[in-house]
Amino acid sequence: MQHIRNFCIIAHIDHGKSTLADRLLQQTNTVKEREFQNQVLDSMDLEREKGITIKSHAVQMQYEQAGKQYTLNLIDTPGHVDFSYEVSRSIAACEGALLVVDATQGIQAQTISNLYLAIENDLDIIPVLNKMDMPSAEPEEVSEQIIDLLGCDKEDILQVSAKTGEGIENVLNAIIHKIRPPEGDENAPLQALIFDSFFNPFRGIIAYFRIMNGQIHKDDFVKFIATGKEYHADEIGILSLSREPRNTLKAGNVGYIISGIKTAKEVKVGDTITHVERPSKESIEGFKEIKPMVFAGIYPVDADDYEELRSSLEKLQLNDASLSYEPESSMALGFGFRCGFLGLLHMEIIQERLDREFNMDVITTVPNVSYKIYTTKKEVLDVHNPSGMPPLNLIERIEEPYIIAQIITKTEYIGAIMKLCLDKRGMLKSQIYLTSNRIEITFELPLGEIVFDFYDKLKSCSKGYASFDYHINDYKPSKLAKLDILLNGDPVDALSTLIHVDNAYSFGRRMCEKLKELIPRQQFDIAIQAAIGSKIIARETVKAVRKDVTAKCYGGDISRKRKLLEKQKKGKKRMRQIGNVEVPQSAFLAVLKID
């Protein structure tokens, strides 16, 4: 165990984690030159296309120093705030962390929040200053920021360029000398923490674990403590670039287990594996339960695909434990699921993965957050969906979730960011100058306001420099109204939203205008209305496609034309009573992009 090191790489998005992981894999000869490609650990097409890491990836490397062979278990983590749960799971399986900071951009919000996660878990932290080959690098200034944040010496900060490979040898030396080896007793009862899993159609569910105490052998009879299920370990092994079977794994190691589990519910991330014959008395403290921030309905386009959608979501949940879902039904869309996500990017990624990995065509409703409703009967209801709201006369008050948002930016963008946050009903808590030209602003904001497009607007008004991190604070009373969209007098529940009274009128008007563009014209007029309760606040009309019935009347008396128009009018009226309006999928998505 003295020769094992478990560490992860944490950083803000785009600071070079995956590139640094590439160089470490090349330096230790884990990946052959002809197999190498950039972002070698990012196995999903989506990750390569978007240039971001979505999943944590574990890999084992062998490195020789001073005649001793060391085993390095690396976990590369995502940097976006929507995937911070992945980071917390990776940190729980490690003893050390490489904190990567971009020398051109300095410390950003997600750097700080990931660092706090690592400190809470008592990890050994090695600061790494990346992108030193860039002409715009400011090593002196950024080093001072790191010293202020960590309280380390300037000599402790490693200066590297992951792109060119400069300084990678120093990183490997620091991992061996500064990160402590894992502690644990090889002879104690087995305790292994599951930190990830995924579904393989041929082998069943493959779980990744880190052994805290004891050892596991091939064909052992093991038990998962949280679910109480027992299995034979058909295959165990280590995670190099591919899975490599082994006969024995001991304390301190990271590996995988295949035991032919077919049901997704039987594997929980954060569960503990132990032996059936000599079980461990207690389970390892797993991870805190994740709280979804954004809720949206996901419905199959074809109602017959409902069961298929359920199994697709189950398999996705194995691989992404921060996704939660429960069945619900809608008047307009039939049966589907109400899913909880950590943010809008997370929601977009899940939609993409359903499409690519499982070939599922889905409709996603307007995202919203969870509200607490206090009724006159002294009940407290958690409402994720506007259609679940009780009637207005039974509501005493509605409370909405508030967040504390930390924004780090250059001083020249303060004005634009302040205006953005105040427009979103934010309250300024504090502003701290980190250096002469960088400032940390703390705002209290309603979560419902940042769900839609806050992050995009923040990036555009700060030219991409501002970084954003948030955590839930508490619930506060708020004046909210349920905004319904009616088509020919019938409410479309998938387009209902809960919105602040001050914004309801303008939002309702914009929704009607947008839907007017998107709903195809029918043989009859379609009235699109926005309503709060029984009060209509906005209306647009999609005009009917009309046949020119008077074309054959040229000249002659006006009464002949009128007779034909009256006949047409009656037909339109009858058609309107029996006609129904199809809302295209693009309309649901366009509502998210209303500016």
Image (tube, rainbow, N blue to C red):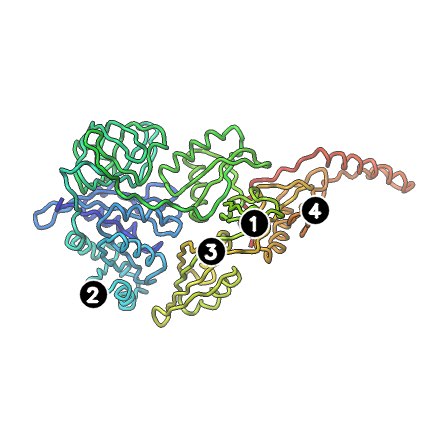
Label 3 vs 1, first from the N-terminus: 3
Query: Viewed as shown, does residue 511 lie left or right of 573?
Result: left
Amino acid at pointer 1: Leu
Task: Report how many numbered discs are placed on residues in the image.
Answer: 4
Neighbour tally class for label 3: few under 14, some 14-19, many 20 plus, Cα within 10 Å: some
Q: Residue furthest bottom?
A: 436
The label nearer to you, 1 versus 2, is 1
Label 2 vs 4, first from the N-terminus: 2
Q: Position of residue 385 (x, y in %)?
A: 53, 43
Q: Position of residue 425 (x, y in %)?
A: 52, 60
Mark 1–mark 4 CB contact (< 8 Å)? no
Disc 2 designates what residue? 153
Amino acid at pointer 4: Thr
The label nearer to you, 4 versus 3, is 3
Label 1 vs 4, first from the N-terminus: 1
Neighbour tally class for label 1: few under 14, some 14-19, many 20 plus, Cα within 10 Å: many
Mark 3–mark 2 CB contact (< 8 Å)? no
The label nearer to you, 3 versus 2, is 3
Disc 3 designates what residue? 402
Question: What whole-number distance in Å separates the C-alpha atoms at marks 2 and 4?
Answer: 68 Å
Disc 1 designates what residue? 498
Q: Which mark is residue 541?
A: 4
Mark 3–mark 1 CB contact (< 8 Å)? no
Neighbour tally class for label 4: few under 14, some 14-19, many 20 plus, Cα within 10 Å: some
Q: Is residue 64 above or below residue 438?
A: above
Amino acid at pointer 2: Asp
Q: Position of residue 569 (x, y in %)?
A: 80, 38
